Amino acid sequence: MLAARSVFRPCWARFASTAASSSYKIVVIGGGAGGLAVSSTLSEKLGAGEVAVIEPATRHYQQPLFTFVGGGLKSFNDTHRPMADVIPPKAEWINQAAAQVDPAANTVTLADGSTVAYDYLVVAAGIELNFAGVKGLEAAIGKNGVASNYSPQYVQNTYEFLQNVRQGNALFTMPATPVKCAGAPQKIAYLADELFRAKGIRNQVDVNYYTALGKIFAIDKYADAMNAVAKSRDISVNLFHDLVAVDGPAKQATFKILGSGPRASESVTVPYEFLHVTPPMKPYDFIKRSALANAAGFVDVNQHTLQHSKFSNVYALGDCSSLPTSKTAAAAAAQSRVLKHNLLAQIKGSSVPALEYDGYTSCPLVTGKHKLVLAEFSGYTGTPQETFFFNQANEHAFSYWLTADVLPAVYWNSMLKGTWNGPSAIRKVANPTSAN
């Protein structure tokens, strides 16, 4: 009964329903940052009962704060709220997982076998952590000195295990797969280095960053900055090293060497005292199996309009999409503006020009307490798109304050409510000439 359309819906639409109405004007798959940014605005525009959000989780996490939790700089309690508190009041929350999408029939099949029909579909499902993709990792993580800031289940282990380190190797990994927040794997290495120095044990601990990629960061300007930071902290950067196995009881990590160098395909086993793992990630199976997916398994959308390449009533944003830019909350905010404009214009039959997404994304690279490199760029062109007049590739206390204290409030109070579309308007005032 809770899922049935009703004139009283605005009073109780936040409460979860597991039995869906037969159809909605818009169905949004995913209650993460992108899904809520879109559904908040669309449900306000279209009215109660027209928009449904399919989301199985009962808590919403502000994942950009997980690095600060792992580094001992924020409380885990700062990172989450009940899903019922953030679902838009005029949207229907279907508290189930999507199991199948049939875009030809305009239906979504839920985990319990029931179906939901839609006129328009927005896919904002995120990306799946694949701990099983590394041999032995599932058995080792959460103990054996192995932690990950990517999971709410294990993020608190990071700081706990770092405090137990007295000597030996501290390893930090980055996989070969696409990941969300691609800067996070190295950020925790800088915070660990700072912690070890504060405890006076840095000379007894070797800090090693292992990345499966060929450079420390995708954009040259910020790669140069991060290489300089790593060198100044005596952090070893190992390129083309992909974590393939973890032996928890023995405290050993095995890497496969990628690339085309003389050691390509060799395996290297390294002992560790602490291991922070960024797990491989993959598209959700219900997307990969559907006609929505491209060859890599992501929702195949036009990189500028966010409309599906084949099904004109389907859109996608965020980590599950094929958009060739870094998968971050900042990217999802900018994408949400484009998607909402273009979808509403389509619903209204308007001839207004489509908005186009330019690949904007941001990766705040925290390098220590009160120090941060604020990377902003287009993933499409590789060009920096910095909001402020100073060189954001430099470590700066202002950038740290902005990321640690201001943006969390923006996230909860504006982005999830559909009113934060990224810093483009601020950039016009704070850096009008794009001098840096």
Image (tube, rainbow, N blue to C red):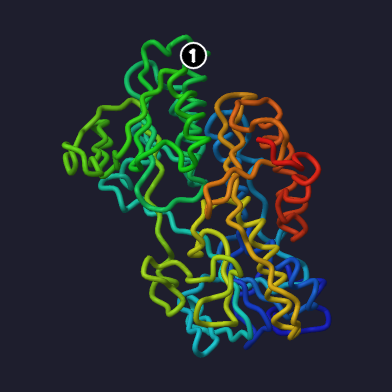
Which one is nearer the viewer's eye here, 1 or 131?
Answer: 131
The quadrant of the picture occupied by the N terminus is bottom right
Q: Is residue 62 left or right of residue 273?
A: right
So how many labels did they put on this image? 1
**Residue 186 % position (x, y):** 46, 34
**Residue appearing at x 76%, y 67% in the figure:** 41
Which one is nearer the viewer's eye here, 310 or 41?
Answer: 310
Q: Is residue 421 left or right of residue 97?
A: right
**Residue 181 % position (x, y):** 52, 46
Mark 1 sits on what residue? 197
Which one is nearer the viewer's eye here, 76 or 409?
Answer: 409
Q: Is residue 399 above or below residue 310?
A: above
Which SS class for mark 1? helix
The quadrant of the picture occupied by the C terminus is top right
* Amino acid type assigned to the residue bearing label 1 in the image: Arg
**Residue 134 % position (x, y):** 29, 48
**Residue appearing at x 44%, y 40% in the figure:** 148
**Residue appearing at x 36%, y 70% in the figure:** 295
Label 1: few (<14), some or many (≥20) within 10 Å? some
Q: Is residue 194 above or below residue 79?
A: above
Residue 277 sits in which quadrant?
A: top left
**Residue 336 % position (x, y):** 67, 63
**Residue appearing at x 57%, y 82% in the figure:** 312
Residue 255 sits in which quadrant?
A: top left
